[in-house]
Image (cartoon, helix red, strand yellow):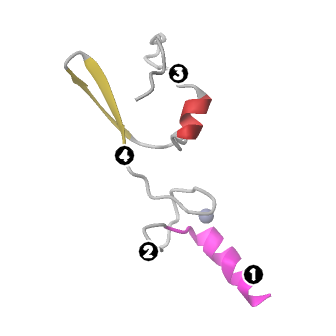
């Protein structure tokens, strides 16, 4: 596991995580995490998020599941339009 280096907590209680780290680990705005403290270590675990395989939206997902992936209503409608043309 690679360290993020030493981080400080700001006055609002936030810790900044480098963008490069977020990108490598596919962490996006709105993702959910569970945090707990164990043996003097803060453990942060990313919770699985169901998002559209095309645009990444987490809302308006259709109740279909394509190999464990989801698709939003907007992308589905775009696919339907392009299929007809
Ligand atoms: Zn979409």
Between the residue at mark 4 and the residue at mark 2, the CA separation in whole angstroms equals: 20 Å
Q: Name the residue under label 1.
A: 82
Between discs 3 and 1, the one toward the N terminus: 3
Residue stretch in magenta: 70-85
Between the residue at mark 2 and the residue at mark 3, the CA separation in whole angstroms equals: 35 Å
Evaluate if marks 4 and 3 touch, with contact meaning CB atoms under 8 Å apart: no
Q: Mark 4 points at which residue?
A: 47
Q: Percent position (x, y) of residue 69?
A: 48, 66
| Quarter of the rendering containing residue 57 | bottom right
Between discs 2 and 1, the one toward the N terminus: 2
Q: Which mark is residue 3?
A: none
Q: Nearer the viewer, mark 4 or mark 2?
A: 4
Viewer-proximal residue, 73 or 53? 53
Between the residue at mark 4 and the residue at mark 1, the CA separation in whole angstroms equals: 34 Å
Q: Percent position (x, y) of residue 38?
A: 21, 23
Q: Mark 3 points at which residue?
A: 16
Between discs 4 and 1, the one toward the N terminus: 4
Q: Disc 4 on helix, strand or loop?
A: loop
Between the residue at mark 4 and the residue at mark 3, the CA separation in whole angstroms equals: 19 Å
Mark 4 Cα-neighbour bin, 10 Å: few <14, some 14–19, many ≥20: few
Q: Mark 2 points at which residue?
A: 63
């Amino acid at each position: 596991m690679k360290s993020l280096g030493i981080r400080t907590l700001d006055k609002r209680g936030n810790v900044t995580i480098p963008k490069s780290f977020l990108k490598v680990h596919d962490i996006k705005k709105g993702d959910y995490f569970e945090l707990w403290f164990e043996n003097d270590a803060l453990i942060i675990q990313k919770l699985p998020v169901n998002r559209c395989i095309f645009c990444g939206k987490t809302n308006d997902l259709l109740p279909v599941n394509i190999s464990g992936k989801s698709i939003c209503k907007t992308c589905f409608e775009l696919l339907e339009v392009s299929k007809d043309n």
